[in-house]
Image (spheres, rainbow, N blue to C red):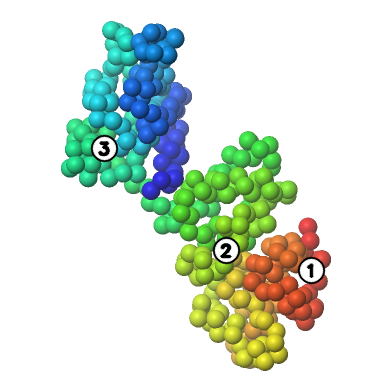
Amino acid sequence: ESGTGKELIAQAIHQRSPRRAAPFVKVSCAALPETLLESELFGHERGSFTGALARRTGRFEMAAGGTVFLDEIGDIPAGMQVKLLRALQEKKFTPVGSNREVEVNVRIIAATNRNLEEMIKKGEFREDLFYRLNVLPIYLPPLRERKDDIESLAMYFVEKFNQTHRKNIKVINAAAMSLLKGYNWPGNIRELENVIEHAFVIETTNEITPMAMPETIAGLSVTARNAGSAASLPTGLTGAGMSAMSSSDDDAEDGDQDIDMSAAASMGPIGFKLDINKLDFQANKEEFERQFLINALKAFKGRINQTAIHANIPKKTLLRKLEKYGINAREFTA
């Protein structure tokens, strides 16, 4: 899929190799027509085509001793495939409009979101070029299939944007991280990077909180989140158990709307422990609500409106429950 982090992996390979002191050069194969792509890769001489006002060094020559990252190799035109194959086999090429050959030593990392083997069957991609490139294939699954990577990737982008935005954000708090892990990421790592940068623009403290998340992340209803969010629920309380608690008869009778307990999945650890010696449903439910509200207020730094939105209850109900449990929201303001 697009945006799964192919360039990040290519850069990591380069940085951890003996070639790390030499350049890492990226070429977007899909962005250029064949005539310009050849010039981009191999360079050209002055006057070799209309607009060639000066000699230009190609990306292969620029990356001498280093790595050339060919992004979207599946989109390279057929005529260019032949020239690329020759350069890989002979380790030399001829710039556009030149009669001299240039020898070069580079590592090639190629990436695509297309099925090259199917393209070979259709005659759209050269089989010999495929096998020349396909020495060590790496499959990158979409981000939704590797949720364990989200935290490390998010912190990588935090370090990156600390430099570019001149900030000193040190952490993504538990509630915000829970939102990131609960999202389905249709845009993959590219979308995650955009979300972290959005948070950097919004956040004024030294940690990223749910308040800094865009609506696509922070404004999700529980049903719109990935089903994997259920794994974030407190130990011993299943999704079914939550539903039962949130539809208790006594609350329906007094007209008070219960907290959407499944919102706990985005609030981090609750700290609720079931008292085996006191198996009173109402008492345990109230203790869970109290702990949940405390946790939510901590996550949103005592902001009533945001807490109500993310707990999925009306503001009046939240205020009533805070009064009921003797919780002062001001104690949680930063």
1 and 2 marks in contact (CB < 8 Å): no
Which amino acid is tagged 3? Asn
> Where is residue 69 drawn, in percent x and y?
39, 31
Instruction: Label 3: state its secondary structure.
Output: loop
In this view, the residue farthest toward the front is: 50
- Residue annotated with mark 3: 134
Which numbered disc, 2 or 3, marks the residue that appears first in the sequence?
3
Identify the residue at image location x=33%, y=22%.
35
Distance of mark 1 from mark 2, alpha carbons? 24 Å
Q: Nearer the viewer, residue 16 or 124?
A: 124
In this rendering, would 196 be left or right of 115? right
Which amino acid is tagged 2? Leu
2 and 3 marks in contact (CB < 8 Å): no
Q: Quadrant of residue 329?
A: bottom right
| Mark 1 closeness class: few <14, some 14–19, many ≥20 residues within 10 Å | some
3 and 1 marks in contact (CB < 8 Å): no
> Where is residue 119 drawn, in percent x and y?
23, 41
Res 329 label: 1
Res 220 label: 2
